[in-house]
Amino acid sequence: MRMHDETARSSADGRTSGQRSTGAGGIGAQAARAPTGAMSAGAKAHAAGIPAAPQETPPPTLLVGEREHRLYVLTPENIEYIEAQGNYVKLNASGADYISRNSVKRLAISLADRGFLRIERSLIVNVRAIAYAQRAGQGTYIFTLHSGISLRSGARYRGRILQVIPLLQPTR
């Protein structure tokens, strides 16, 4: 049976075969028990007592959509809605449709802080693109966008819709 390099076979200080070496330089038991995983830069700075650098704002989210064998860089503000199409999503921006290899679930999470709201299992809408909403019954709504397109929400998403857009009349 082979031993790892860090396992001593025998030593002059009386350790028997199979005991682990703590390394040269007389490192104590505390250092031997210290975690050996990689530390992030912030964790190293905190451990060293150095104040952490201020967090930078993340770069703007850009989406890449394909149309007519060309790739277009799209800003979320220009996208009216996003619809699932199999393994792809259709991005509707300024009346043109683009496809992207992504998922509605992933985009709903990453674009939530940019004003996008999931209103159906396969549909996300840019809240700024909504002209008006109508009740459609059974907890659903029909959203009409500034471009004239109408999108129907699902009853399952009613709670989240009402959190973002206060569509109910206040009770007296």
Image (tube, rainbow, N blue to C red):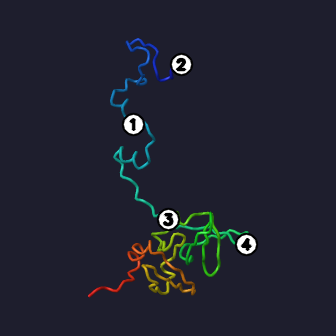
Cα separation, mark 1 vs mark 2, equals 26 Å
- Image-based side of 6 in relation to 49, left or right: right
Dot 3 corresponds to which residue?
110
Disc 2 secondary structure class: loop
Q: Which residue matches tag 2?
A: 2
Q: Is residue 104 left or right of residue 68?
A: left
Q: Dots 1 and 4: beta carbons under 8 Å?
A: no
Amino acid type, mark 4: Glu
Q: CA distance from mark 3 to mark 1?
A: 33 Å
Count of picture labels: 4
Residue on which disc 1 sits = 35
Mark 1 and mark 4: Cα distance apart in space: 53 Å
Q: Amino acid at mark 2?
A: Arg
Which callout, 1 or 4, points to the residue nearer the camera?
4
| Along the line of sight, the residue nearer the viewer: 35 or 110 | 110
Give the image location of residue 31, x and y in percent.
Answer: 36, 31
User: Which residue position holds label 4?
Assistant: 68
Q: Which mark is residue 85?
A: none
Q: Which of the two discs, 1 and 2, sits closer to the camera?
A: 2
Distance Cα–Cα, label 3 vs label 4? 26 Å
